[in-house]
Amino acid sequence: MEAIKETMRRVGVSDNLYVRMAKLHLEKREWGEVFNNAKSALDRNPLNAEAQKLMKQAEPRVFAGSGGPGKAAAKNLRMTIKNPMI
């Protein structure tokens, strides 16, 4: 992992290096880092199939929880739209 970070500093970043970092974090089950590195790879190359697979694998684990703020915010928005005076 340190070798890849050093390569990124010296040579520059690429989608392949981000995918390699994501795979290393996957082995450690660090889902947030897997997601972040896969997302960075997709930002550089939206057609990277490996990064898409890694992101799909990590996404449910990163955003899992008790509904999270996303669902509550959506419910509040629906309530506001239905009753704009509230």
Image (tube, rainbow, N blue to C red):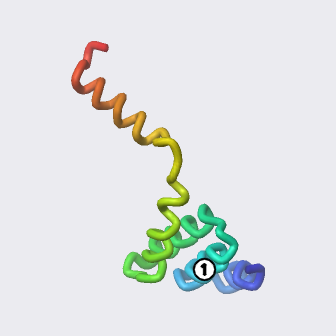
Say which residue label 1 marks.
23
Q: Amino acid at mark 1?
A: Lys
Residue at coordinates 24% horizontally, 19% vertically from top-left? 83
**Residue 65: percent from left, percent from top:** 53, 47
Residue at coordinates 40% horizontally, 39% vertically from top-left? 71
**Residue 73: percent from left, percent from top:** 40, 34
Residue at coordinates 45% horizontally, 73% vertically from top-left? 42
Q: Nearer the viewer, residue 37 or 34?
A: 34
> Which quarter shows the C terminus?
top left
Residue 47, image quadrant = bottom left
Residue at coordinates 46% horizontally, 42% vertically from top-left? 67
Which residue of the protein is positioned furthest toward the right in this rendering? 2
**74 with respect to 64 (left or right):** left
Q: Nearer the viewer, residue 24 or 5?
A: 24
Seen in the picture, residue 6 relative to 77 is either above or below; the reply is below
**Residue 22: percent from left, percent from top:** 60, 75
